């Protein structure tokens, strides 16, 4: 089922999410998250964005009109995630968010990191990633801690509506 996505300003988005303890209750939530993300052409979705304060994110990109020319990111369910930066190297890039529709911002993120957590069956896994994949997982996990990408922007002249920042284009150019 496609669920409404909370938008920036809704106080539920500022809350810290609870760890998942009962995996039996996740099946319906994950179906709804996948349906909602696909319907909106998102690269990822966190449970708090649909009003569920649990530490659950999904993400994955192959071909996506909102992100043309990006490297593929495997479809992933990540529960109770832990992020470990692998260096202090940061990389800035354009980000958008389903909870901040029609806008983009220039956001610093760790370039390389390892993430670990549980899959939808409760099995532990970890991955070492960089680039866009690292950006996507950091963006989604931020939602679990009540952080939206505009809170990370250093230069607010690089935050605005898509049509104002990128006249004549529906998306920012890839950097």
Image (spheres, rainbow, N blue to C red):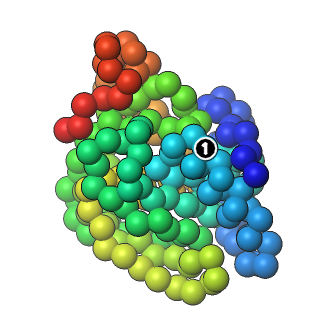
Nearer to the camera, 30 or 151? 30
Q: Position of residue 167 (x, y in %)?
A: 31, 13
**Number of numbered markers:** 1
**What residue is shown with label 1?**
39
Q: Position of residue 98 (x, y in %)?
A: 56, 38
Residue drawn at point x = 49 percent, y = 58 percent: 59
Q: Is residue 167 above or below residue 127?
A: above
Task: Classify residue 5 by image quadrant.
Answer: top right
Q: What crowding class fits label 1: few (fewer than 14 Cα within 10 Å), some (14-19), or many (20 or more)?
A: few
Q: Is residue 66 above or below residue 114?
A: above
Q: Position of residue 173 (x, y in %)?
A: 25, 31
- In the rendered image, the residue lying farthest to the right is 25
Q: Position of residue 164 (x, y in %)?
A: 37, 13
Q: Is residue 110 visible?
A: no
Looking at the image, residue 93 sits to the left or right of residue 160; the answer is left
Looking at the image, residue 12 sits to the left or right of residue 118; the answer is right
Residue drawn at point x = 40 percent, y = 29 percent: 104
Residue drawn at point x = 38 percent, y = 50 percent: 63
Residue drawn at point x = 52 percent, y = 76 percent: 117
- In the rendered image, the residue lying farthest to the bottom is 123
Q: Is residue 30 visible?
A: yes
Q: Is residue 95 above or below residue 81?
A: above
Q: Is residue 36 above or below residue 82?
A: above
Q: Secondary structure at mark 1?
A: helix
């Amino acid at each position: 089922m496609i669920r409404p996505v909370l938008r920036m300003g809704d106080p539920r988005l500022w809350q810290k999410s609870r760890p998942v303890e009962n995996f039996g209750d996740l099946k319906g939530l994950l179906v709804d998250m996948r349906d909602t993300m696909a319907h909106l052409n998102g690269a990822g979705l966190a449970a708090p964005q649909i009003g569920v304060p649990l530490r659950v994110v999904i993400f994955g990109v192959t071909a996506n009109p909102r992100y043309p020319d990006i490297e593929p990111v495997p479809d992933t369910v990540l529960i109770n995630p832990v992020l470990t930066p692998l260096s202090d190297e940061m990389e800035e890039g354009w980000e958008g968010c389903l909870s901040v529709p029609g806008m983009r911002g220039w956001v610093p993120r760790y370039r390389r990191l390892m993430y670990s957590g549980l899959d939808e069956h409760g099995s532990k896994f970890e991955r070492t990633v960089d680039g866009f994949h690292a950006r996507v997982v950091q963006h989604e996990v931020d939602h679990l801690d009540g952080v939206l990408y505009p809170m990370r922007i250093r230069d607010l002249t690089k935050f605005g509506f898509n049509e104002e920042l990128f006249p004549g284009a529906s998306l920012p150019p890839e950097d």
